[in-house]
Image (cartoon, rainbow, N blue to C red):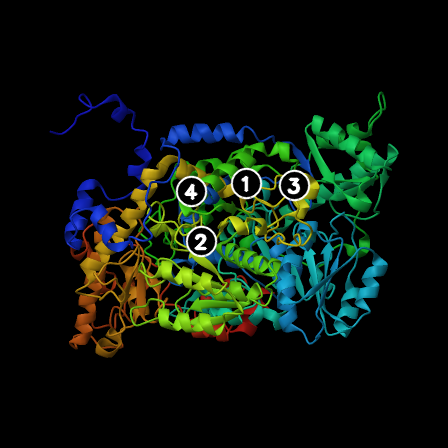
Amino acid sequence: MTTTPATARLADLENPSAFVARHIGPSPEDEARMLAAIGEPSRQALIDAIVPPAIARPSPMTLPDAVDEAQALEELRAIARKNRVLKSYIGQGYYGTHTPGVILRNILENPAWYTAYTPYQAEISQGRMEALVNFQTMVAELTAMDIANASMLDEATAAAEAMTLAKRSVKARGSVFIVSGECHPQTIEVIRTRAEPLGILVRVVHSADEWQAALAGDDYFAALNQYPGSSGWLADWQLSADLIHRKQAAFILAADLLALTLLKPPGEMGADIVVGSTQRFGMPMGAGGPHAAFMACRDAFKRSMPGRLVGVSVDAHGQPAYRLALQTREQHIRREKATSNICTAQVLPAVVASMYAVYHGPAGLARIAERIARYTGVLAAGLRQMGVRVAHATGFDTLLLELGSPEAAAALHARAVDRGMNLRRYTGERASCVGISLDETTTREDLRDLWALFASEGQPLPEVDALAESAGTRIPPSLRRTSAYLTHPVFHRFHSETAMLRYIRALSDKDLALDRSMIPLGSCTMKLNATAEMIPITWPEFANLHPFAPADQLAGYAELDARLRQWLCEATGYHAISLQPNAGSQGEYAGMLAIRAWQAARGQPQRNICLIPASAHGTNPASAAMAGFEVVVAACDARGNVDMADLEAKCAQYSDRLGAIMITYPSTHGVFETTVSALCALVHRHGGRVYVDGANMNALVGVAAPGAFGGDVSHLNLHKTFCIPHGGGGPGVGPVCVVEDLAPYLPGHATAAAAGACLGAAPLASGAAGTATGIGAVSAAPLGNAAVLPISWMYIRMMGAEGLRRATETAILSANYISARLRAHYPTLYASENGHVAHECILDLRGLKETSGVMAEDVAKRLMDYGFHAPTLSFPVPNTLMVEPTESEPLAELDRFIDAMIAIREEIRQVETGVWPREDNPLKNAPHTAHSLLAADWPHPYPREVGAALHARTAVPGAMKFWPAVGRVDNVYGDRNLFCSCVPVETWAEASPEACPETEAAAAAR
């Protein structure tokens, strides 16, 4: 008998686990149909047939019971209230900013932007790639450099990447990297962490004399300084650049992008590489992130530059089109030869920053910067009038004040906090000083409040109006910018909110994200990013906190961090976790550093061999190489599993030097390997540690725990398994998880410790480069991308242990359903002996090349006509498609995808039988744009409605028509004619390949 609301139990009506059914797509009735297609009697029977009994969890996870969305938000709001939002004058790379409402609502809070994936499929990613080209143009022009990439993880890691870029690009053979002590301390700390495994000696200099003496030497390959300096002062670096270049070394500047609207840019001072953060371009501080950092460089360095680069090419119709340029340059593809492991970036924050520049335009940005500079001049003049010593005569937004003693500085800090303000704290030789940095949010009233901190009882305060007439800015005339920037029309057209709104909408309409359809990317876990999970990230209590504010002001973040780490330990079976790594690649890197440090601490520093299966993610060998390991590839057998005989032989061969093995589980081939426990035991017997890549954790939560079946270290991707959205290619969070004896080697953060800030899981005793046993910081902020952590907290809180396990089981069920239904059309390449897969399956298209000339790429492009983003293309096996449906897709959407794949297989049959030519058919010409289908001339042997896949309305019930903005993009042309800035307007008008060569386009853009 069916239970009705009138007869239901009260507990059922309360329904605390209501969100579970919202998150998981298939209903119980759908599940029964799916199981029937697979041939299993129940979901539990399916899981028992797939997960090796030796690793299956013996008991459920110990997590709080699920609550509904309203209750979870209420609980999280109570945690948020424990944070104290004070007015921040700390600076140090993090500043108050105003996010324009039109950008906040229509980008940062819009699923059309935050649920998109990295734009590898260019034809359905033109909108966000245009925004990224705007970002690259903005950075390149403000820095006056030749080229800029599409964002980095944070300023500190960008500086570390610049160090290694310089090392592999210059003729100087030295091993020393000179760093000015005027760089932000968190930047210096991350550089030290990165440098040590690579054998690079970091030499920090603390005065102008030390700087000049260091540059006069012959043992360095690059030098880094900050502009403006971290304590505020300005200098023209041309003479330094000249000296560095005479040594055939590279000059790197870490620059403030907003300041460059007023200051002589680094490119006009001889800089070779420029890095920095775009945080103050509309992204809240968020206790440290996420924010889009940047890297710009001279043209000679472009093919070695890390990170992603969006370039301009042409499509099949001769129209300009964007694409990810020089993809073979991406370091993670170079595996063990890599010098960087970046495989993600900060796309969503980069889009926000670029739109901030588009909305304000060059005049608006200069107005904001000039106001800040004027306020800083007025503040300094008033303080001097009150008898306060201002250390530097120059500056943009920051003052260093000398108070005479550490006690006076401490008393001022206490007084400031009592009045709702945070100033920058200094230690060591500057313990008697305090710092004040102004920003976009500063007002006249703020200046009066700051003066009041220093006023004795009854002392009159300076008058803003009176000082404004005489004070001016602190920028020397010789350092005033004279060159133009942001000259492209895109930075001048959209200054009204109406125009801006329509521009944002026009770009999002060109992209296919999860708000439109399923994105079945294998190894990417494109699952639901629920609205309730996203709501808290813009709450002021989370968004408006400085990462180096006193720890008691971040009590809410500390509680959030502690609970989330506890829950993730329960999910993974590990003892300790750090949330500091701000990308999966950085979690990998931190994990390998922990293993290396542990081996060294026990007197085994020679253990530098890392075994990695041939099927591993590209970031695995890249991370191992960066951490100082020598990579040795382990073979896989014909079924795609690790070849245990080969592994045993290599363990024996390298037994004295074996440091670690890196595996992915379930395997990258989409299979639960039954020998994983034996593999872990084998490596342990030979003195190595086991790194289990957490990329496929969505197949394990609640079912098996890597920390329990033999893993020593894992990283997680909270932007996969735990619902942080991909944001079009970032942000991400890559926590590193370890067993108990590796816990002392989690990332430290000396900068946060010195500031008395919230440390998260960082060992309390960490020094500038870690302790004798620990490692240093891997991210600029101690909590990494802290502002998005509430998303994962909400997900776990609303799902509970039972809901999380059901999600895992449903993800496995959905993958097996797709594999079973498509098996007659596209064989599944790898499966277990009983024919099952894990949470993803690899469809084998390799045989189609011979029978029809059709490649996997053709099927991927044809899926766009059917309204789908393609599965993962040619990874880990060339000419295959790896499909991961996740647990969030309803059965109707799974069936729509399956029907589309079957319809495409029938189209291929038309080619195989000779009805359509191999060179001219719907697959080779895909995707089809509306413009091409409406053209008067239609030279193809198939009807227009077939090209448009409009027949899919019958063949694929429920089909949604999505029109790709461009035809198939010419990748070869784009790399041969590299152009990575905004496309000149006349190029779009002419719309012919001849309009796009690098020389013409570059000249027109400049």
Of circles 2 and 1, which is in front?
2
Point out residue 765 in the picture as x, y percentages from the top left corner: 66, 46
Instruction: Find the distance from the CA under tag 2 to the CA under tag 3.
Output: 29 Å
- The N terminus sits in image quarter: top left
Q: Badge 3 is on which residue?
A: 548
Q: Amino acid at mark 2?
A: Gly
Q: Return the disc, 1 or 3, that comes first in the chain's sequence.
A: 1
Q: Badge 1 is on which residue?
A: 100
Point out residue 279 in the picture as x, y percentages from the top left corner: 60, 47
Contact flag, marks 4 and 1 (Cβ < 8 Å): no
Can residue 641 be seen? yes
Instruction: Find the distance from the CA under tag 4 to the CA under tag 1.
Output: 40 Å
- 352 shown above or below 422: below
Q: Badge 4 is on which residue?
A: 570
Q: Badge 2 is on which residue?
A: 728
Instruction: Find the distance from the CA under tag 3 to the CA under tag 4.
Output: 29 Å
Determine the secondary structure under disc 1.
loop
